[in-house]
Image: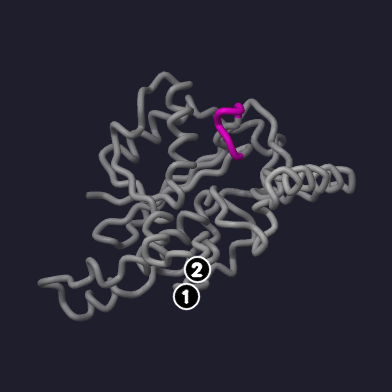
């Protein structure tokens, strides 16, 4: 079965509040190795970003204004993922958004076309009681994510591919019938990420008033829930990848 490492970026944390997908990044694995057949698209959301979301992704409505809407790329996306195993970190988040986009595009359910593996669930089973965010797993498993300055669909999918290989090493790396050199290659991490494959990405710098509004928003979250997941070590496991 084809394995596709998938990550999305969105305008906010909940699709039920009208937030939309703005970026999809996919890395294809064949026999647990990158094929080079990746999928990467930005999308115009037709809604605003929630406070903090644009800063996390580095995206803006101006940058996305000339990009296609999801319903314009959905057939291409479905042709790419159809029948594959999707590997996603915190799959319920990404799948919730993608299923909503599918409904809005009149395309039925994505889950009827693919199978889904959640690396967050895998990590929690292997490392119970520990932080299992993508960054935390990179540190724990020795995956280089020093080039991850912003969240990005294709970039995060590439990093997650390395994390997934590290998480599952020893389970499927026996490689009966493989030459020793191929076994060693399969057991190693994937090739370094080539940043040149990314589409041009804007740099968004928040204004003083935007930062003040953002901090006020976080203060409300902390007062209500006792924390905000943006606070890093002070927060519990963040939900989105």
Q: Is 76 drawn above or below residue 239 in the view shown?
A: above
List the single residue furthest toward the right: 208
| Mark 2 burial class by Cα count in 10 Å: few <14, some 14-19, many 20+ | some
Q: Residue at x 79, y 50 (%)?
A: 205
List x then y, in percent, for residue 98.
45, 34
Q: Residue at x 60, y 31 (%)?
A: 19
Q: Out of 227 and 25, give the one closest to the viewer.
A: 227
Q: Secondary structure at mark 1?
A: loop
List x then y, in percent, for residue 29.
32, 56
Q: Secondary structure at mark 2?
A: helix
Q: Which residues are magenta?
A: 13-18
Q: How many marks?
A: 2
| Mark 1 burial class by Cα count in 10 Å: few <14, some 14-19, many 20+ | few
Q: How is the image coloured?
A: one colour
Label annotation for residue 138: 2
Calculate the distance from the C-alpha at mark 2 to the C-alpha at mark 1.
6 Å
**Left or right, 158 with reference to 182:** right
Does the residue at mark 2 contact the one at mark 1 (Cβ under 8 Å)?
A: yes
Q: Out of 59 and 241, give the one closest to the viewer.
A: 241
**Left or right, 191 with reference to 199:** left
List the single residue furthest toward the bottom: 180
Q: Is 186 drawn above or below residue 151 in the view shown?
A: below
Residue 169: within the magenta?
no
Q: Out of 186 and 50, give the one closest to the viewer.
A: 50
Instruction: Check disc 1 and report the residue beneath it.
Output: 142
Q: Residue at x 46, y 69 (%)?
A: 192
Q: Residue at x 46, y 49 (%)?
A: 90
List x then y, in percent, for residue 34.
34, 60
**Left or right, 146 with reference to 106:** right
């Amino acid at each position: 079965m084809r394995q596709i490492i998938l990550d999305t970026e969105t305008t906010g944390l909940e699709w039920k509040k009208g937030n939309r997908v703005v970026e999809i990044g996919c890395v294809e694995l064949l026999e647990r190795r990158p094929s080079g057949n990746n999928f990467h698209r930005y999308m115009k959301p037709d809604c605003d970003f929630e406070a903090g979301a644009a800063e996390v992704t580095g995206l803006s409505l101006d940058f996305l204004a000339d990009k296609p809407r999801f319903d314009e790329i959905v057939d291409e996306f479905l042709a790419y993922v159809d029948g594959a195993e999707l590997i996603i970190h915190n799959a319920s988040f990404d799948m919730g958004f993608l299923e909503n986009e599918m409904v809005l595009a009149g395309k039925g359910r994505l889950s009827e076309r693919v199978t889904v593996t959640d690396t967050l669930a895998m990590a929690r089973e292997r490392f119970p009681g520990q932080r299992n965010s993508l960054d935390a797993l990179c540190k724990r498993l020795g995956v280089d994510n020093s080039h991850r300055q912003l969240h990005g669909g294709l970039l995060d999918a590439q990093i997650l591919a390395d994390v997934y290989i590290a998480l599952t090493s020893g389970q499927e790396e026996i490689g009966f019938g493989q030459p020793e050199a191929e076994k060693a290659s399969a057991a190693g991490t994937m090739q370094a990420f080539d940043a040149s494959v990314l589409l041009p990405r804007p740099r968004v710098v928040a204004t003083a008033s935007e930062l003040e509004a953002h901090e006020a928003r976080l203060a409300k979250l902390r007062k209500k829930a006792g924390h905000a997941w943006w606070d890093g070590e002070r927060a519990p496991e963040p939900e989105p990848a």
